Image (spheres, rainbow, N blue to C red):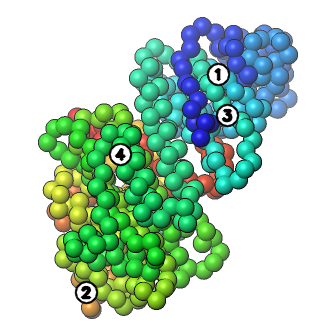
Amino acid sequence: MAASLVKVEIAQDSAWDAAVDLLAIGLFENEPLTGVLKEVDARLGGVIQDALSRNECKGEWLASWDTATLGMMRPRRLLVVGLGEKGEFDLRRLRLAAGFSAQKARDVRATALAWSVPPLTADASDMADVMTDGIIVGTWRFAKYSRDSDGYALQEAQLFDLPPGGQPGLSRGQVLAHAENYVRELGMRPSNKLYPQLMAEEALKTGREHGFEVEVFDEKKLAAMGMEAILGVGSGSEHPPRLVAMRYHGGGNRTLALVGKGITFDSGGISLKIPAGMEEMKFDMLGAGAVIGAMRAIAELKIPLNVVGIVALAQNIPSGTSIKPGDVVKAFNGKTIEVINTDAEGRVVLADAVSYAADLRVDWIVEASTLTGAALTVLGHEATALVAADDGLASLVLQASEASCERVWRLPIYPEYKRLYRSNTADIKNSPGRDAGTITGGMIIAEFAGETPYAHLDIAGTAWTPTSPLNGTKNGPTGVMVRTFAKLAEILSH
Ligand code: BES
Ligand code: ZN
Ligand code: MN
């Protein structure tokens, strides 16, 4: 994965003297040429102004225009990136623009990129963070299961015109981006190359490399602990389930638990899904991926908070030993679940994982899962759905997500929804039907958090997106929630 080893640095002096292949400069919509762009235009004999007046070059969001510089300045090429309305420009867009420039750098096979960082009323370190993150995430490509490789890798990026104080953001952005790319790597791996045992081994390896403890519970241990829920979901597969507990000791006397859904493949089980698009259900472990990635980032950033990460890993496939509609399983906390639909498996495995977290007497539980197609219906690929009864925790999650350039939208919890998942046979049923599907999904899992403040994040629409300026592989995993989780740990550590 050489592509993500790009070195990002803060540079002084003039961007137009940068020894790079490609210089990127932003242009706001309906704004005249000013600052660096004006200087560069003068060096290039007015070619930008000319393109602007012909409407070839424009400031519309992610419009782009580029030219060879023909020896008139040091960078071999110039890229003008549309930044949209000045009033709408923020850290989120800065990160996306940085990612977009990485795609463009690939197009012209630039190995060194420079940015004249656009002006923004924001902390310089935050700006350096999102620029670094956007470039490294934008550069990532999955190393295909193929002998072909295009051999391209961006080597370095230089950030010019950043206000002073950006240095800390460079290393933060780098740590987070590498963690995000790691999660994306896991997301791309198909289920024959990433099943529960292998994903547990990934957690062990990541813990060894980045400094957190990892404990793996195999199927025998899960049975001994009374975790019928995760065992039930995994019972159809030759690859038995695993629950992984990761512990990072950052200090202090409070602990955040991050919990993730890790279905390495979701065929639906006996309640089989339709074939169209089923291959994408290898992505159903990205909640767990985000937790492992966040643990890695949190440990590397040495955030002064205790964090435990718990991931529930299982494969949901039909066989003679599979869990069946009507079966009842008892979760770790003693609550029973009637499995109406084996395709609503995420909440079932999370029943064990979340009740295990609550049993650890942690102070907060924040869980991420690709839980419902309904989350996609409501918010599309633009935002993660938040379901949380605890207003305090909900607002901290929203604050963390906002600061992390990851959109999260809170849905309501009304007591009336409870009747949708009442069961005649067990404490609850797993499949309440279509109505308010994302909300009932979160409310069902909340039943297993007990009194611990709990927040559920449905990343079904955001963990994998068809297009994004950050994703050169187009349809692919995003690494979403790594940044938000790390930020939340930072906020909670104060
Ligand atoms: N992993 C899926 C959710 C999903 C579906 C994510 C489509 C992205 C696209 C989950 O396990 C699932 O199958 N959920 C069901 C729940 C229903 C049976 C209550 C769903 O969303 O249809
Ligand atoms: Zn699923
Ligand atoms: Mn499912």
Instruction: Tell me which amino acid carries mark 4.
Output: Gly
**Which numbered disc, 2 or 1, marks the residue that appears first in the sequence?**
1
| 145 or 165, nearer to the observer | 145
**Which numbered disc, 4 or 3, marks the residue that appears first in the sequence?**
3
Q: Is residue 19 left or right of residue 217?
A: right
Snapshot quadrant of residue 248: top left
Q: Dot 1: what SS? A: strand
> Residue 226 at what x, y percent from top left?
22, 75
- The residue wearing badge 4 is 207
Instruction: Tell me which amino acid carries mark 2.
Output: Ala
Snapshot quadrant of residue 472: top right
Mark 2–mark 1 Cα distance, whole angstroms, equals 61 Å
- The residue wearing badge 2 is 426
- The residue wearing badge 3 is 153
> Quick check: marks 4 and 3 in contact, CB under 8 Å?
no
**Which numbered disc, 3 or 1, marks the residue that appears first in the sequence?**
1
Respond yes or no on whether mark 3 lies under 8 Å from ligand 1: no
Residue drawn at the location 57% of the way across and 20% of the way down: 159
Q: Nearer the viewer, mark 3 or mark 2?
A: 3
Res. 114 mark: 1
